Amino acid sequence: MPIYTYKCKECQAAFDRIEGVIADPGEIKCPECGSREADKCFTSFNVGKSGSSCGSSGYCPTCPTCPGGSCGI
């Protein structure tokens, strides 16, 4: 399920919600102030691929799970 980021119109707090793609998101409520007025923010996303290593060389300088840049997978 996708994660959407919202920004509260009252207190300006940003918060994330996991929502279904097709289902109605239901009531949106700020966890900080309880306001029901929030805007959905535009955010970036990352698309990964499944496989046995990070890239053909096994070196991945940006992978957070690769200490020293090597997956070791």
Image (cartoon, helix red, strand yellow):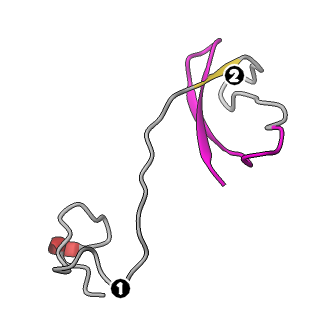
73 above or below 4? Answer: below
Q: Which residues are magenta?
A: 1-24
Quarter of the figure that contains the N terminus: bottom right
Q: Seen in the image, is 38 located left or right of residue 41?
A: right
For marks 2 and 1, the one nearer the N-term is 2
Q: Quadrant of residue 28?
A: top right
Q: Position of residue 23 (x, y in %)?
A: 82, 44
Residue at left offset 43%, top offset 57%: 47
Q: Seen in the image, is 30 located left or right of residue 55?
A: right
Q: Which mark is residue 52?
A: 1
39 above or below 59? Answer: above
37 above or below 21? Answer: above
- Amino acid carrying mark 1 in the image: Ser
Q: How many marks?
A: 2
Task: Kindly identify which residue carries mark 2.
Answer: 33
- Amino acid carrying mark 2 in the image: Cys
Q: Position of residue 21 (x, y in %)?
A: 72, 47
Residue count near mark 2 (Cα–Cα under 10 Å), binned few <14, some 14–19, many ≥20: few
